Image (spheres, rainbow, N blue to C red):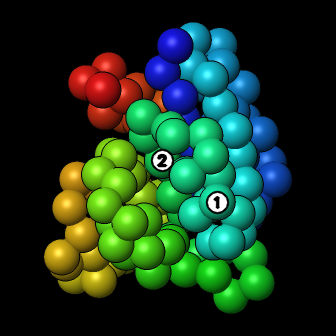
Amino acid sequence: MKKVLIVEDELVIATVLKLQLQHAGYEVINVTTAEAAISKTLEFKPDCIVMDIFLKNGGNGIDTARAIRDMQIETLIIFTTGNSYENTKEKLTGISNYQLLIKPVEFNHLEEFLKNL
């Protein structure tokens, strides 16, 4: 069973996404902060991380992804954001193995990326 870590601070979004992924056959854990994302990545060893750009406590998904990459972890990261696509894409420069989805995320778009794990 493939494992997905959801890093999302909006409870409704995280819950819906978790239920959809579990129904599709994935093992899922969700967290709300950058610190938890890093520790769960090390502990859970996900096949994919679905990461919101803006997190609780002033956290930032981009900085969190850079920290994960600094630990030599190349897990696919699927960033989600409600912000401008081009502006966000510029900020992701230098991060390897990622995809970007604009909110509201349609599950079939997410599932396309997950099928290739």
Residue ID at (35%, 55%):
73
Q: Is residue 77 above or below residue 24?
A: below
Residue ID at (48%, 47%):
49
Q: Element type at marker 1?
A: helix
Mark 1 or 2 closer to N-term? 1
Q: In which quarter of the image is residue 85?
A: bottom left
Expressed as whole percent of the image width and height from the top left, the position of residue 79 reads 42, 58
Question: In the visual, does 4 lie left or right of 69?
Answer: right
Question: Counting other residues with Cα less than 10 Å from the Cα at mark 1, is it few (<14), some (14-19), or many (20 or more)?
Answer: few
Expressed as whole percent of the image width and height from the top left, the position of residue 39 reads 64, 60
Q: Which residue in the structure is indicated by mark 1?
A: 39
**Front one among 88 and 64:** 64
Expressed as whole percent of the image width and height from the top left, the position of residue 19 reads 72, 26
Question: Counting other residues with Cα less than 10 Å from the Cα at mark 2, is it few (<14), some (14-19), or many (20 or more)?
Answer: many
Q: Quadrant of residue 55?
A: bottom right
Q: Element type at marker 2?
A: strand
Q: Which residue in the structure is indicated by mark 2?
A: 49
